[in-house]
């Protein structure tokens, strides 16, 4: 798959301990994005943060380190990302979902690369 030019970046901010049917929510989102054939999804674990609860979660305090902030980032065409939003409505009951317009400079999947010449 090749992707260049205007696109949307979807970022979902949740807690590391958030689940969906006893499975980590971030994993469920990634698997659903994969099933929807989106260009890619990455999960980033934060070292410190707070959300709507105003409670700071940090790796420095043992009692709060089990619910660190997590961000899932997905970039694809506007049409494909917007088509995925109803899935997030089902999955994300607490958290923050944002969209940013971005310009993709270079994205080429492994299947798009030519075999090296010998």
Image (cartoon, grey):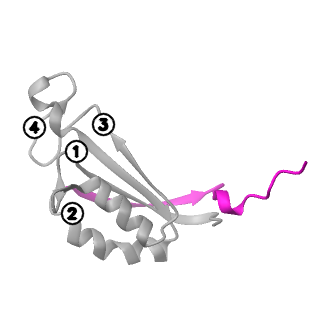
Residue identified by numbered label 3: 46
**Residue at image x 24%, y 41%?**
69
Which residue is at the front of the view, 78 or 26?
26
Residue found at the very far right of the displayed protein: 118
Looking at marks 1 and 3 on the same chain, the residue that comes earlier in the sequence is marked by 1
Whole-angstrom CA distance, mark 4 to mark 3, is 14 Å
The answer to whether one can see residue 108 in this image is no
Looking at marks 4 and 3 on the same chain, the residue that comes earlier in the sequence is marked by 3
Instruction: Determine which of the numbered discs, if any, sits on residue 92 in the image.
Output: 2
Give the side of residue 75 with respect to residue 70, left or right. right
Task: Count residues near mark 2 (Cα–Cα under 10 Å), then give few for <14, some for 14-19, many for 20+.
Answer: some
**Residue at image x 37%, y 43%?**
44
Looking at marks 4 and 1 on the same chain, the residue that comes earlier in the sequence is marked by 1
Residue range highlighted in magenta: 95-118
Instruction: Determine which of the numbered discs, if any, sits on residue 55 in the image.
Output: 4
Q: How many marks?
A: 4
**Residue at image x 8%, y 45%?**
53
Kindly indicate whether the residue at mark 3 contacts the one at mark 4 (C-beta within 8 angstroms).
no
Task: Count residues near mark 1 (Cα–Cα under 10 Å), then give few for <14, some for 14-19, many for 20+.
Answer: some
Residue identified by numbered label 1: 16
Q: Is residue 28 above or below residue 87?
A: above
């Amino acid at each position: 798959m090749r992707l260049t030019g205007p696109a949307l970046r979807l970022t979902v901010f949740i807690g590391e301990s958030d689940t969906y049917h006893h499975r980590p929510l971030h994993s469920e989102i990634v698997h659903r994005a994969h099933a929807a054939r989106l260009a890619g999804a990455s999960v980033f674990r934060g070292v410190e943060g707070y959300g709507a609860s105003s409670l700071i979660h940090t790796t420095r305090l043992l009692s709060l380190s089990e619910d660190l902030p997590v961000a899932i980032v997905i970039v694809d065409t506007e049409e494909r990302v917007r088509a995925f939003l109803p899935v997030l409505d089902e999955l994300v009951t607490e958290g923050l979902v944002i969209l940013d317009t971005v310009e993709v400079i270079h994205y080429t999947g492994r299947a798009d690369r030519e075999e090296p010449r010998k």
